[in-house]
Every structure is written in C-alpha cells, then in structure tokens.
Image (tube, rainbow, N blue to C red):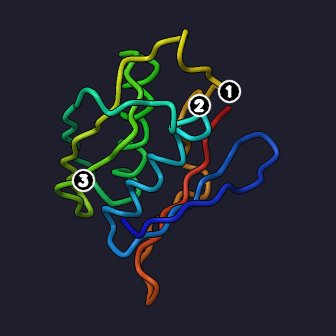
Amino acid sequence: MNASARYLDHPSDVGIEARGATQAEAFAGAASALISLILDPSRVDATEQRSVSLTATDAEQLLVRWLSEILYLYDGQGFVGREFKLNTCSSTVLEAVVTGEPFDPQKLTARMDIKAITYHQLAVWHDAAGWGVRAFLDV
C-alpha cells in the first residue's frame, strides 16, 4: 500500500490527514492513523476479521461513517483493527474487511481517548498526486 498519513494541530481536537493512490488507500490510511493515536498498532496481531459495509450521501459523510465504525469496533466491541482492506470505496459505498484482535489490556495500552469523528474541516479530494482525506477527532 502507498498510503501516508500525518497529524494536524488544532486547539481542542486532533486532525488526521491521509493520502493514497486511490480513495480506498486514503481511507485505509486514515483508519490506520486513527488507531495509531489510540494505541501502538505494531503490538496488535491480525488474528480476527470484521466486515464493514457502509453507505452515505457523499464521500465526506462516508469518511466520517468509516472512521466512526473503526472507533465503534474499538470502543463498542473491544476490537482493535490493524489492517484495513477496502474492497469497495466510492463516493457513497464502502465495503471493507478489518483485521486485528480483541483488545487485551494486559498486552495493549491505550494512549489517547478519541470521543468522536467531527465534520470540522472534513475533506475528501482527488488531485494529480492521488487521493487525500482530512478529519478532526474530538479528544
């Protein structure tokens, strides 16, 4: 995968921005950046899979729903994603497989609590360099 991600400063939130050759790579990079804020993903084993199927009215809403689902898997189901394979990623439909493991507090240490994905400065774009996404997270 050729995705990349960086963190953005904000007074009350944390921003993530991810790039990729495709929209799917950019979305996967954003999910990886989200998990990297929460804990060290290198300590997560890829032992189980969860399927994700989402629809939205546009690509920006799809990004919020995608990142919210990754956060829900962690907070609501106790499942930590490590690998994010998006089989379908259009402006309104996302089908993915998230590979990771159940959260084990003996093995994994949370470093940041993410409350929600916000719509503040939310963006999905395509340019000559590929695809990019930006989202701010309420901490």
Say whether disc 3 or disc 1 marks the residue closer to the N-terminus.
3
The quadrant of the picture occupied by the C terminus is: top right
Q: Quadrant of residue 26?
A: bottom left
Q: Is residue 50 left or right of residue 121?
A: left
Whichever of labels 1 and 2 marks the residue nearer the N terminus, that label is 2
Residue 3 x, y percent position in the rendering: 44, 65
From the image, tell me which residue sits under label 3. 86
Q: Quadrant of the N terminus?
A: bottom left
**Which mark is drawn over residue 111?**
1
Disc 1 and disc 2: Cα gap in Å?
5 Å
Question: Image point 32% across, 47% down: which residue?
Answer: 84
Q: Which residue is mark 2?
A: 39
The spot of residue 83 in percent (x, y) is 35, 44
Three-letter code for the amino acid on which mark 3 is drawn: Leu
Labels 1 and 2 touching (C-beta < 8 A): yes
Rendered image quadrant of residue 25: bottom left
Residue 11, quarter of the rendered image: top right
Q: Is residue 139 left or right of residue 53?
A: right
